[in-house]
Image (cartoon, coloured by chain):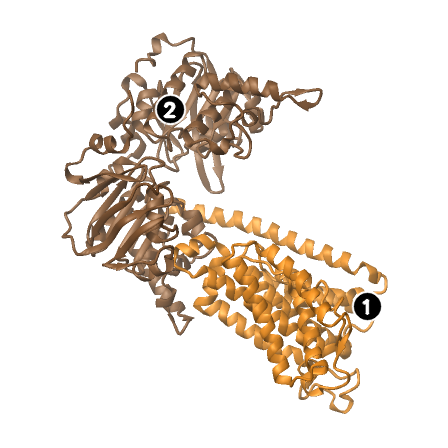
Amino acid sequence: MKKALGMLVLLVVVAALTSLAGEGFLSAYNLENLCRRTALFGILAIGAGLVIMAGGIDLSTGSVVCLSGCLLPWLLVEQGWSEPAAVATVLGAGIAIGLFQGGLVAWGRLQPFLVTLCGLLFYRGVARGFTADQTQGFQGGYDGLRTLATGRIPIPGLTDLEAFDGPAAFAIPAPVVSLVAIVVLAAFLLRFTVWGRWLLATGRNPEAAAYSGVPVRWVTLSAFVSGAALSAYGGMLFVLDVGSAQPADFGNFYELYAIAAAVLGGCSLRGGEGSVVGIVVGAALLQVLRNTITLVEWIPDNLEYAVLGAVILVGVLADELVRRYSRRRGRRLAEDRTSEA
Amino acid sequence: MNDADPQHGPDRTIVLEARGVSKRFGAVLALDEVSCTVRSGEVLAVVGENGAGKSTLMKILSGVHEPDGGELRFEGRPTRMRSVRHAQDLGVSLVHQELNLAENLDVAANIVLGREPRRLGMLDGRAASRIADDALRKVGLSISPRTPVASLGVGSRQLVEIAKSIAADARVLILDEPTASLSKAEADRLVELVSQLRQGGTAVVLISHRLDEVLRMADRIVVLRDGRQRGEIDRSEATREKIVSLMVGRDVEAVERRPIESGPVRLALKDLRSDAHPRHAVDLEIRGGEVVGLAGLVGSGRTELLETIFGVRRARAGVVEIEGVRLPPGDPRTAVARGVALVPEDRGRHGLFLPDPIRLNFAMASLADHSRGGVLSFQAIRRLADRLAEDLHLRPPDHARAAGTLSGGNQQKVVLGRWIARSPKVLLLDEPTRGVDVGARAEIHAIVRDLAAKGCAVLFASSELDEVLSLADRIVCLREGEITGDLDAADAGEEAVMARLVAEQVA
């Protein structure tokens, strides 16, 4: 939580600097867009974070996004399925992927990195296969369903209803609603339930957890299922937002954004720690940085990845230094107390 | 063994000397003006309880730490040991308690590691073998230098470590608990080797818990307590009682062993075969209220047997019954649910969540009891932790702290507390007081006896006969997976137990 606060400060600083150095950062249009993107990536990052907290890693996020992003319009438009059936199938596919990957990790004792690396290749390959590499879109239809991602909720008293459809009006983008629901649920499960403790304990020390009677395999499985299901849901929102998906590059590198957000937000890749709120702050920080690169003229857009890479590295390094410092301090305090006792 | 007669040893010049050495870690003064001299051809023993400062002193002598105060002298000249490498170059070599060999390499490569002989810039394998052969002969180990280290037992590894020091021309050899994990025969061999080295003029510094060994090998004994030097005893004046009183500085109460009314059979093993020793079946019954000690040497299968009962290790064959009901094999969850608890040997790895708060560590096995509908009750967890911290005399009693900040003994209390929270029917303990100081050890023994008094069946494994003899009502002797004795502790002596642990040797 302390770390989430630090990231929040960093987020505010970056936002403030960007609003000074670039044009239009604080415009209603830009802020709303930032919120939408943060929500979409935040959902993926929470999925990635849950897997990381359980001691695993999920590299397949981007490919699951691609698969569900292509599957949804394909089922609706090409196959003529009903909306509930298509949505249920997409989410079901996500859960099935989680069961498959989690099962291989928990019972097959394979390394999560390898299992999900194969998944990364496999699901994108499948998506490109059944679509024959053709862009899948809603072709102007399904506006009702698309509201889930494109909808805008006016804030009473703040949103200028007269100019609601123009760029000057700020409204809450619909994905934020999904994000908030997922944050509340995930944070509650993680902090206040037995399952959450089991998840963190499994990530912290799987052997000690097994010796304490924790159903380590089931917990691992549940983490992978949560991760893949959130990726599938996120992928659905992404395609509903932009309207179409190109199988070859839809969701490319999204796993890295998700993992980076989780790590910036306080998850240790060693497992066992992290906070859901922190992850969202991490996701927001990444989106603001991307925005900064676009808005600030003297930063060439081509440097996007270089800037992101550098910032993540600095963040992780700073965290490690703080951790080392506080550990040393903590030990000293502990020693003080022990010697008094 | 009369090889330690000081009058007949070789010339004893002071090789290494510590003068008023101090070392502080944070707020703790680990060493407070300790002085000692290490002479060639002499064995200096350093004894003390855990945390007395022995390891810190060794680390200073071998260049791992630099002292904050005082000075080191090597051959009479003030010296700063800047690094382990520097100390080795001077001829001071430390053989660690946890052996530091590269298991993936062979013996020769380990012996020359870091000082590999080269020819034309390339590794000279033949020279390495020669050096290794020579060093192995000196330690009396008849194995090929090409043997992979991974295939060696603990005893041989220890000798390879010493060979490595010899190959590096060590003039001062520091041995940290060298016999802690050796069998009797291996330990004897080591004792003999040390006396040979000593005759050859090597200075040996020995850290050991085993006082009989210290008395047998040492020419002088330095006793440390709480980082301070409490005495230096010459061989001729050394007695066990004298050392212990200097080490402890107080009398330690032994646990009173009241006979406990034994109840119904809680744990029954029928024809149980672990994967470590599948040839021998184990049959055993333990009643509620009984404390059974499982005695055995390294490799006897103690740990494996406990792990097989608990289910973290799958049995090859046979049945574990809890109160007459069969446990499914390889399923620790069900074992826990039926009231079985295991306190593992390696606390850090299998027992604790070190960075997490103590109270979470307490509650980890009983979260379901401290929650409603899957939602945790933090109040209930805090109440549990308050109660356990008090009952177990946790020091310090603040259970919001990370478990990793506690001392070994208090960490062990936390693992025990986790199971007490579940009121276990069968408690299995593996080396319950390893790395625990004398005071906490007595407390832990009292806790175990108390659990038995409440009707729990206790089975504990220990490599220390003292512990088995003082804690158990009944002693089960294990040798290479086979039960070789089931004795009443009241009339079992050390010799009777030992005789059943050691394999019959062909004379």
Q: Quadrant of the N terminus of chain B?
A: top left
* Image height of B163 relative to A109, above or below: above
Q: Residue B437 carries which label?
A: none
- Vertical comparison of A146 with B199: above or below: below
- Which subunit holds the residue at mark 1? A
Circle 2 — which element? strand
- Dot 1: element: helix
Seen in the image, is B470 located left or right of residue A204?
left
Q: Residue at x 48, y 67 (%)?
A: A191
* Relative image position of residue A171 (x, y in whole percent): 70, 83
Q: Disc 1 and disc 2: Cα gap in Å?
A: 71 Å
- From the top left corner, tell me how far across and down residue A23 is, in percent: 83, 71
Q: Is residue A156 above or below residue B417?
A: below
Query: Could you classify mark 2 by the number of other residues whose Cα lies within 10 Å: few (under 14), some (14-19), or many (20 or more)?
Result: many
Q: Is residue B299 left or right of residue B115?
A: left
Chain ID for brown: B
Q: Residue at x 83, y 60 (%)?
A: A302
Q: Name the kind of residue labelled 1 in the image.
A: Leu
Depth check, front residue: B460 or B108: B108
Quarter location, residue A314: bottom right
Task: Determine if residue A228 is in view.
Answer: yes
Q: Which mark is residue B45?
A: 2
Residue type (three-letter) at the residue carrying disc 2: Ala
**Chain displayed in orange:** A
* Residue at the image point whose x is 73% and y is 56% from the top: A309
Q: Where is residue B300 in the image (x, y as percent from the top left)?
A: 33, 37
Q: In which quarter of the image is the C terminus of chain B?
A: top left
- Which sits in the foreground, A288 or A214? A214
User: Residue B13 in the image: x percent, y percent?
Assistant: 45, 12
Dot 1 and dot 2 residues touching (CB under 8 Å): no
* Residue A295 numbered tag: 1
Residue extending farthest bottom: A162
